[in-house]
Amino acid sequence: MTAMITIEGMTKVYKMGDIEVHALRGVDVTINKGEFVAIMGPSGSGKSTLMNMIGCLDTPTTGRYALDGIEVSSLNDNQLSSVRARKLGFVFQQYMLLPRQTALANVEMPMVYRGIPAADRKQRAALALEIVGMGNRMDHRPNELSGGQQQRVAIARALAGSPAVILADEPTGALDSKTSEEIMHMLMQLNREQQLTIIIVTHEADVAAYADRILTIRDGVIIDDRRNQRGAA
Amino acid sequence: MTELRRTIQPVATEKGGGLNLGETLRVSLDSLAANRVRSFLTMLGVIIGVASVVSLMTLGNGASNAITNQVASIGTNSLTIFATSPASRGPGGGGAAITPLDMSNVATIESLRLPIVGPVPQFTSSSTVIAPAANTTANVVGTTATFQEVQSIVMEVGTFISDDHVRSVAQVVVLGAELKQDLFGDGVAIGETVRIAGKPLRVIGVMELKGGGGFGSLDDQAYVPISLAQQRLFSARTANGQLRVNTITVSVLDAKNIDFVQERIEMALRDQRNIAPGAQADFSVINQAAFLSTLTQITGLLTTFLAAIAGISLLVGGIGIMNIMLVSVTERTREIGLRRAVGAQSRDILLQFMIEATVLSLFGGIIGVLVGSILPIVLTAMGTLDAPITPDSVIISLTVAIATGLFFGIWPARRAANLNPIEALRHE
Ligand SMILES: Nc1ncnc2c1ncn2[C@@H]1O[C@H](COP(=O)(O)OP(=O)(O)OP(=O)(O)O)[C@@H](O)[C@H]1O
Ligand SMILES: [Mg+2]
């Protein structure tokens, strides 16, 4: 097993005027390549903060973070952008598709910032859309798609650039339970068949049940880390 | 749920290190095209601004040219000399008699050997001109062959008066285009005889239409050898037996000699006409160039003024761009957050918004040039005004439009580029 993510003694303090908010109080965790991890915990416990750190969208106050062999804690803004572009795929609760662009254009968009040639980009985007079952909706705009379909397009977008890790903060938060199941099933398949490392944040136990490892956070520290039997799906 | 068959391969070719200009341009154009109505409304300010700059500058230039051409047609390098009553200019004089210019003054100017064409004397009387089929009253101008050169006269048919005609007091006449029309209609005039002051004169030439109308039009006059006018047609003898002339015109070969030539003529004529030093002369020398430069200054000022007003509307257009770009940045905060999250560098975002602003102002500028050209083109086609679209008004207004876009685009673009991706993503 190779380590994809190594976090040691990570803290994050937000300063708001005189008040200091300790969002993370010392997180230590290692996530291996090919793992499907769910992060759970009560509201305000630091789940999103941890995801932002893993996603290289923010830098920790103290501690060490290595992603796929890259020491992230020491990188500048441009280097972080580059790491996000190459190593990470994001799935958001609100899908975050560009409203006036087609599904295909939406999936292509992140690859534009990596300087991937246009023809290659199109081919990858089309394949990713096929993999998530949206091959027949490539020319549709987001407002012509259901919530579940939009989230599939968003997953295709995260997938198309062949990232090391896919990060999904409450990916089913805006979906009904049946659609949530479909989306989680698909993520599970991607994890199995493409050996993708996937990390999700969720409040719901039946969503977390698709993962093979569940981390529980409370008050900025990991209080529970256990294997999960993926029989639930 | 079907099994996933194919897998995504690792990326083989990527440049990284931010976007190139072409890709950013594509992203920007995509965004603008995705929001056509707003893009157009943003451009509207620039369109109106550039259109008014182009049309006002063009019309201003056209009007200014029309005025200067009118004056220039008289001859920019020409000096006109005519007799005046010294008393009428000074106080206490009353109605002292004017001492007219005469041929001895012409001879004096000739003897100075100045770098000029001329002098061209004119002796003009109004007279009835009788053709076989019609008659009319017209100015009959007695002059010399050089008149043609000084006034840039082109002949429709035949020739102008020659030195031989003047020497031999030939009974010939040249007709202005409109006078010919009045007397002969579309018929042939050349070779016909017209009677002026009872004398039969042979028509030897018809001038091409000068146009322009206005005062002292050359088109409705008749031209005869000055000797004929002075000696046979009208009485031109002065009290001291000289032959009278109304005006003497000289055309200075090089404009920079005008002042010098004017001074020499004034000195020589004062001398000849016995004007005491310091006394008011009994003749005037009018310098067309001085008049023209004053006129040019005024019309230039007018054009600048119009352009400045138009410039203000362009400025307002620029502020419009900034305004909408700021709204656009706020409205697209989540889009910016998303782009940053998936790997756009802040430089890419800056460039994207700068290009959007520049493209808007450039397209607005181009449309503005087209719209602003309509009025001058229509007016020129109708013959009201000769106002060609000058390349400099197009280049100036396009440059200003692009500069406006860049200048007013920087602030919104920097705001977009400096957004924190996490906060931008959370933006409602
Ligand atoms: N930018 C910020 N500035 C100040 N405090 C912040 C900021 N972001 C998060 N926090 C604080 O850090 C703590 C952890 O927030 P975080 O968003 O990680 O919680 P969460 O576990 O994702 O909660 P939820 O389940 O509601 O999404 C909270 O107390 C929150 O108020
Ligand atoms: Mg959260």
Image: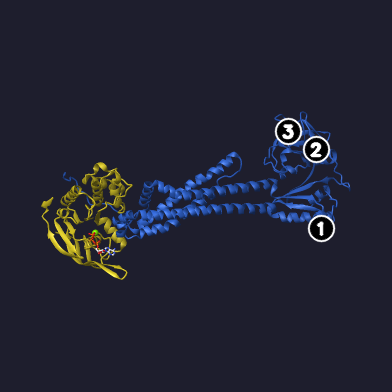
For the residue marked with disc 2, what is the amino acid? Ser
3D distance between C-alphas at marks 2 and 3 = 15 Å
Q: Nearer the viewer, residue B137 or B333?
A: B333
* Label 3 crowd bin: few (<14), some (14–19), many (20+), radius 10 Å: some
Q: Are marks 1 and 2 in contact (CB under 8 Å)?
A: no
The residue labelled by disc 3 is B182
Q: Which x, y percent locates residue B291? A: 69, 52
Chain B: drawing colour: blue
The residue labelled by disc 2 is B127
Residue B91's disc is 1
Spot the residue most to the right: B240
Q: Is residue A84 above or below residue B38?
A: below
* Label 1 crowd bin: few (<14), some (14–19), many (20+), radius 10 Å: few
Chain name for mark 3: B
* Label 2 crowd bin: few (<14), some (14–19), many (20+), radius 10 Å: some
Chain name for mark 2: B
3D distance between C-alphas at marks 1 and 2 = 36 Å
Residue B230 image-quadrant placement: top right
Q: Which chain is yellow?
A: A
Q: Secondary structure at mark 3?
A: helix
Q: Are marks 1 and 3 in contact (CB under 8 Å)?
A: no
Q: Which x, y percent locates residue B414? A: 39, 59
Left or right: B57 as drawn, with respect to A176: right
Left or right: B360 as drawn, with respect to B248: left
Q: Nearer the viewer, residue B130 or A63?
A: A63
Q: Which x, y percent locates residue B241? A: 88, 46
Q: Nearer the viewer, residue B405 or B24?
A: B405
Residue B229's disc is none
